[in-house]
Amino acid sequence: MSYPKSHWKSSKGKCGLINIGNTSFINSILQIFSNIPIFRKVFKKIYKVYSNLNTDAVPSSLNKKVTYYFSKLVDQIWQGQHRALKPLELVQVFYQIEKRFKGYGFKDPYDFFKQFVNILHDDFKYISSKAYDMKRNTPVCKSFLEEWDIINNIKNYTDYSIISSSFKGKLCARVKCTQCNQIYWCEEDFMGISLDIPQKGFLYKKVQNPQIHKYLFLFLKNKQTISFYCEQCKDQVIIEKTYTFLTLPNILCIHLQRFKEKAFQKNKTVIEFPINQLEFSHFIKVYIFNSYDQKLTQFELLGLIEHEQSQGGDHYSTIVRNNKNGLFYKYMDDNVKVIDQNLVQECEPYILFYKLKHESENALIRNLHSQIKLIKSGEMNLNINKSAFLPCYWYEKLVNMANPGMIITQHLICCHGKLKPDFFDCFPPKQNKNSVIIADSSTMDPSILVDMSINNDNQCDTNYAIEFLNNQSVTVPVEIANYLIEQYGGGPLLEGNQEICIKCIKLARSIKKRRKLERELIAKYDKKFTEETYIINEVWMTKWKEYLYSNKKFLKRNFIKGLPPPGQIQNKTLLNAQNELKQGMKKNVNFIIVNDYIWQIFRNLYGGGPALVINDYNSRKKNYIKPQLTKQDIEIIQEIIIKTDGKQKVLKSFKNKNKLFKYQKITKC
């Protein structure tokens, strides 16, 4: 066939991916992702940050390596200089994370899609209030978050990322108890929809002319019978469950279950699917959750993945609409060709990707885009006191997506109303400045060494948080930022003259010092022998260990203080109504045994109780001398408390401890 003139204007994006031994299921998803406009722009920017570094920019984390190699691949695909590329590094790293995808057996691209989305989301995610989650008539958010409050009340918060805002939608589940007829309503998030294709029975008769919207109707209205705990019946019962859509994603992934029973038995039902308009208005009904607003309900085909069987095994090819010229291209590994739209409709799709249709570019977006270009080029000078920051991810969503969602900036502001410091503002690394920018491009890499010689708590000697904000935001006039927040919701406003919070830096350094002092104190007495030993709830001990030792998973941009302290000791849960140890309690499963010194440290740092003493050595005799902490240890405990509370506490004397709290004698464990 003769290619249209628009095909020859540019070769960008028309690049195949070489099959490295049964990797067509990976190549098919990578081609879809690289042709999504917002992903293309975001990942090209990420690779630009890496490529500007003088040192080796490959991160150490496996998840970050996936992000890095995918951003590198996207950049090379859209350079227009390659006919085919070998994604060897990306595939090898992914095999290290998920070994089940390695080998020559049947591989499902939908499974790879779900895992790939989870990895990218985990690398980009940040935590903020659930109020931002696509709700209607939500007032501008002016509240500030304290990170330990977030961790302690995590149910009120959720993860956000550029990945989830692209693929995530919401379902409204109607659950009916078959015994008492009680009806429950609940929300369920989804990143993709898997549709059953019945080949026989009642459901098969309902779909005489197989069309995609009929299978969507079956998915929503077909009653699922599953086990559920009914609050009315106070028991596990069988319930009937149906769905409707609450909100629609910007990119809808529809998986057709052609291999439901066995991988080698393919359901070859020919299903009609629209290319230019898939209407969802008749699938959306609002029952109880009337706080959601879904005005846009039409989708257009972005691309599809087709499965082919041959003697050589299973193979997947991808058909994608190029957003530059509107033509469809078929990617068969390293082979790329233009395909006519009529031939697209004759395909047997295995996975369909639709994007939400939006109105044509309005004057607001054109004006905003032109002002941002003028500010970046320096042709337009903007007073810092009259400027504001918009997250660049949200700006890209505004330009490239039908529903950009709310402007989420709450996670960038500390509880004092100032710019939340970066981890490296609190603890500057012993590396060059460029290495820090790598970590800040997504989330902090806690493996970097920290310079503990920085003890000046009176000022902030670094500007990593401001650099992060400049790299991850676009600057606009404050009037435009206020208008956009009022129009789309969210907030609070990020003004251009934001300063890094010194109070948060002081607090983070104090908490780190507290952990160090507590670890040293525990290590001093941990292996000492005392006649009296004490029982401590294992659940409390686990929280204490996570707080003191396992903070790396929380040492990210949102959590500079790590996990919160465990609170008061909760030993009452180990006792029955007669204040005796419950039967069946096991050592190192339900409780931990510590010596007298460790108990004194815990009791004075955290409080709580009661004290559960094991009298294996008849330590209550008259001449028994209770071990005492030294004066220096008491001063360290006082300093630890001051580091957290911010005010001095006078500890009671360690003498006559029997009068300070009740002992519960345990003679057998």
Image: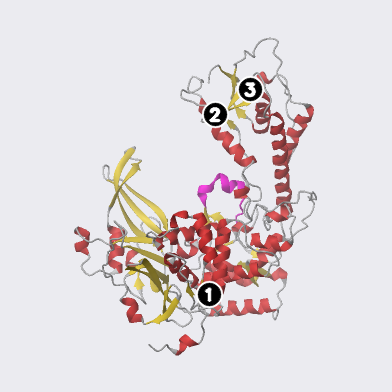
Q: Which residue is labeled 1 in the image? A: 77
Any part of residue 322 in sight:
yes
Q: Nearer the viewer, residue 669 or 372?
A: 669
> Where's residue 97, x and y in %?
51, 55
Relative to 359, does residue 435 appear above or below in the rendering?
above
What residue range appears in magenta? Answer: 142-157
User: Is 408 placed left or right of 226 in the picture?
Assistant: right
Q: Which residue is labeled 2 in the image? A: 591
The amino acid type of the residue labelled 2 equals Phe
**Residue at (33, 53) in percent of width and height:** 174
Mark before the other along the chain sequence, 3 or 2: 2
Relative to 513, does residue 80 appear above or below in the rendering?
below
> Where's residue 318, x and y in %?
41, 72
Label for residue 334?
A: none
**Residue at (72, 73) in percent of width and height:** 383
Name the element at disc 3. loop
The amino acid type of the residue labelled 1 equals Ile
Relative to 614, does residue 214 appear above or below in the rendering?
below
Which residue occupies the extreme top position in the image?
622
User: Is 212 placed left or right of 79 in the picture?
Assistant: left
Q: CA distance from mark 3 to mark 1?
A: 69 Å
Q: CA distance from mark 3 to mark 2?
A: 20 Å
Query: Does 561 lie within the magenta span?
Result: no
The amino acid type of the residue labelled 3 equals Phe
User: Is 459 placed left or right of 42 in the picture?
Assistant: right
Q: Which residue is labeled 3 in the image? A: 661
Query: Does 150 lie within the magenta span?
Result: yes
